[in-house]
Image: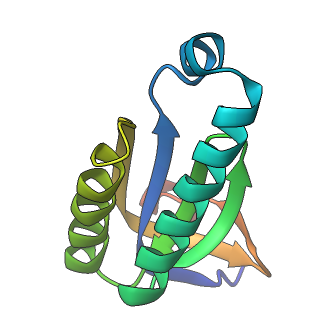
C-alpha cells in the first residue's frame, strides 16, 4: 500500500466558553466577535503560511509545514484575541498526516505500515 503522508504540524483552536459569551454578550455581539476572531485567525494563518483545513462555529483546524510556524502563529493569535477579550485553546500536534484534497484522511502510525 502506498501512503501519501507528510510530516506536518496540525493545530486546532477553540474559543473558551463560547456558549457563556453568547449568554453574556448576546447574539449580535457574538456574531461580530466571531467574525473578528475568524479574520484574525485567517490573517495569522496567511502570515505564518498555515493552511485552513476546517472551520467550526468557534474554531479552526489548520496545518503547517513546521512546528515553529505553528507555535508562533498560535501564540500571536492568542495575544491578538486576548485584546478583544477572547480566550482560546490551541492544541498542536506534529507528526505524519495523510491529506486527501483539503481533508485529513488519516493519522497513520508506523505499526500500520509495517
Q: Residue at x 48, y 78 (%)?
A: 43
Name the colouring of the figure: rainbow
* Residue 61 occupies quadrant: bottom right
Q: Residue furthest right?
A: 101
Q: Residue at x 19, y 76 (%)?
A: 68
Tell me where residue 19 appears, x and y as whole percent.
62, 16
Nearer the observer, 4 or 72: 72
Asked if residue 17 can be seen in this view, the reply is yes
Tell me where residue 6 appears, x and y as whole percent.
49, 82
Up/down of 92 relative to 43, above or below: above
20 to the left or right of 44: right
Tell me where residue 28 appears, x and y as whole percent.
75, 34
Q: Residue at x 27, y 79 (%)?
A: 69
Q: Residue at x 44, y 58 (%)?
A: 11
Nearer the observer, 60 or 86: 86
Tell me where residue 65 appears, x and y as whole percent.
38, 85
* Residue 73 occupies quadrant: bottom left
Q: Quadrant of the N terminus?
A: bottom right
Up/down of 93 relative to 48, above or below: above
Asked if residue 107 can be seen in this view, the reply is no
Count of labels in the image? 0
Nearer the observer, 73 or 23: 23
Amino acid at each position: 500500500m502506498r501512503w501519501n503522508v507528510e510530516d506536518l504540524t496540525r493545530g486546532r483552536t477553540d474559543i473558551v466558553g463560547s456558549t457563556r459569551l453568547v449568554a453574556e454578550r448576546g447574539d449580535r455581539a457574538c456574531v461580530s466577535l466571531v467574525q473578528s476572531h475568524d479574520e484574525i485567525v485567517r490573517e495569522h494563518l496567511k502570515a505564518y503560511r498555515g493552511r485552513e483545513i476546517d472551520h467550526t462555529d468557534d474554531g479552526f483546524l489548520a496545518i503547517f509545514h513546521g512546528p515553529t510556524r505553528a507555535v508562533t502563529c498560535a501564540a500571536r493569535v492568542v495575544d491578538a484575541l486576548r485584546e478583544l477579550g477572547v480566550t482560546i485553546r490551541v492544541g498542536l500536534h506534529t507528526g505524519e498526516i495523510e491529506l486527501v484534497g483539503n481533508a485529513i484522511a488519516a493519522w497513520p502510525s508506523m505499526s500500520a505500515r509495517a
